[in-house]
Amino acid sequence: MGVDLGGTTAKFAILTLDGEIQQRWSIDTNILDDGVHIIPDIIDSINEHLKLYNMQPSDFQGIGMGSPGSVDVNAGTVIGAYNLNWKTLQHPKRDIEAGTGIPFAIDNDVNVAALGEQWKGAGDAAANVTLVALGTGIGGGIIADGKLLHGVAGSAGELGHVTVEPNGYLCTCGKRGCLETVASATGVVRVARDMAEEYAGQSELKQTLDDGDEISSKIVFDMAKAGDKLALMIVDKVAYYLGLGLGNVGNMLNPEYILIGGGVSAAGDFLLTRVTDYFKQFTFPNVRETTKLRLATLGNTAGVIGAASLARK
Amino acid sequence: MGVDLGGTTAKFAILTLDGEIQQRWSIDTNILDDGVHIIPDIIDSINEHLKLYNMQPSDFQGIGMGSPGSVDVNAGTVIGAYNLNWKTLQHPKRDIEAGTGIPFAIDNDVNVAALGEQWKGAGDAAANVTLVALGTGIGGGIIADGKLLHGVAGSAGELGHVTVEPNGYLCTCGKRGCLETVASATGVVRVARDMAEEYAGQSELKQTLDDGDEISSKIVFDMAKAGDKLALMIVDKVAYYLGLGLGNVGNMLNPEYILIGGGVSAAGDFLLTRVTDYFKQFTFPNVRETTKLRLATLGNTAGVIGAASLARK
């Protein structure tokens, strides 16, 4: 079983050992009262659905879960998941194993999405796959030689904080020029506002900004696809930074696939081809020839599938 | 047994299973006749020393070897090792196993040095260690979660080709701004020549260059240590690029240690403290607090020790 815990909903899936989804459901995440209801709600929902499907705990190899926040994979604990109102140390492994009688494993949400895409998505079950998730922020997960990397303190795969512009924008992390500041959904808007100020030509996007209307990364990409010159310059700049940052992922790790997921990746091949051009410019020959960029394909189900893979023996 | 094959010598060591060196010797590498003598010479030397020490093939778990060139770890073959005159595919595994009766494993020389430093050197046997070797070029090796990374086509760990200056110097690899172009021994000299041209103040280093005398990275560091202002500016620039490049290693992989080895690292703490300052500037908080830069400690013996570790069961 895989559980993808998010700030709005918790998604559940029961899968075969081959990763085929048999059942799916979801519940709302109740973040009231410092999030104390979240784990009991998950336990109740699992037990109800086992009853519903006439299944026993012994029918499962285990439950895997992806969680926001800082996850201690070995202890099975989470701290600092602010969109869940979890400010103090939580014990999902201890509590969910006690509440369901099923072995439990946990990792952070983006790592788990990377496992899902690697196993059943665009990663083609290759041994070396990196996912970069372009959302409000940027997260990432690295599978190398078949293993998800964590590093010494759980920060391996934090591709959002790779420095791509040494004197660039200040990031929420406190340092400058992080990939997240220029290529997340909020980063695209930031780049758009800055470039619009200096742009003198005709542009519907500039007009929109001058009118004081809100924009989004989706609006920027849509206008670029429609030929807006300013929007095209913005997309080019975002693609440049992604090509530089992901190029260095390639130069260091030489994965078979670097998968681009998250909301911004909805821009599709229009983004992918531009990022790939810069990626080729910023990688040395053997990586250029053997590491491929792809769009992630699983969307919302990457989390439950990857989470389930944590439970595999 | 570990073998460290280089263009000038092949070094050998017999080690205990704990990595303690019991015997060491070396032979000259005979690169004549397209390097056809190299493997037979290695086999003869191993067999002679086994006789000398009154040992049997069954006394060994195996032989591990580090080699220049492009190594196929699974096939046990090497191609394109130009300092050995090996232009065509070589079969060290097949030939050395047949010639000695001992199981054999091989990897590239920098990966093997990384394993050595991780096991018995500055890596303190930690599960997450990266080595960057600053020599004529720059190589690297990454151990993550206890495993040496190779990537899909053997290029994982090629830290010399991480892009640190998008519009920088052209590298031998064909792309621009590789770390190797500014922080290898030849890179330091290149940076020195360029900065000297624009430097107007008093400097013994500038005088040396203006006199047409050859300089080396060692001369640059020695003059910087003696207070030469131009040399200090050059060292600062080299440290900046190393801090940026290794900072991104930290941001992606969060190793416990990033070890700086190779000839340029002879500059010691003078270099390390300056690189560390920039490393802290270019890493986000959790990495800044948990990933440490260190000087490699094994020097020439990293190769034989790491090679031997390939043979461990």
Image: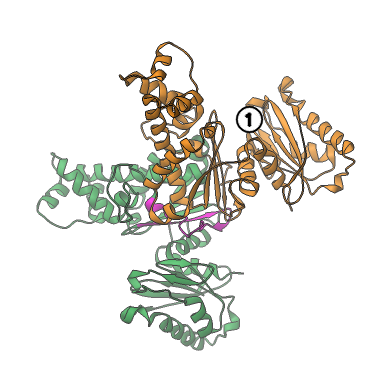
Chain colours: A orange, B green
Q: Is residue A99 magenta?
A: no
| Label 1 chain ID | A
Residue that carries the numbered disc 1 in the rendered image: A80
Query: Residue sitting at 65 percent across and 35 percent down?
Result: A300
Query: Residue sitting at 71 percent across and 33 percent down?
Result: A90
The quadrant where residue A11 appears: top right
Q: How far across and down, in percent of the image, does residue B5 sit?
A: 41, 72
Lateral position of residue B205 relative to residue B170, left or right: left
> Would you call the spot at circle 1 few (<14 residues within 10 Å), some (14-19), or many (20 or more)?
some
Q: Nearer the viewer, residue A129 or B195?
A: A129
Please indicate, yes or no, whether residue B295 appears anywhere in the rendered image.
Answer: no
Question: Amino acid type of disc 1?
Answer: Gly
**Segment tinted magenta in the rendering:** B138-161
Lateral position of residue B28 relative to residue A108, left or right: left
Q: Nearer the viewer, residue A294 or A66?
A: A294
Q: How many marks?
A: 1
Mark 1: secondary structure: loop
Q: How far across and down, in percent of the image, does residue B40 sit?
A: 43, 84
Judge whether A128 appears above or below B77 on screen.
above
Q: Is residue B139 magenta?
A: yes
Q: How far across and down, in percent of the image, does residue B59 sit?
A: 59, 81
Please indicate, yes or no, whether residue A20 appears anywhere in the rendered image.
Answer: yes
Query: Residue sitting at 20 percent across and 46 percent down?
Result: B194
Residue that extends furthest to the front in the rendered view of this protein: A226
Lateral position of residue B19 relative to residue B224, left or right: right
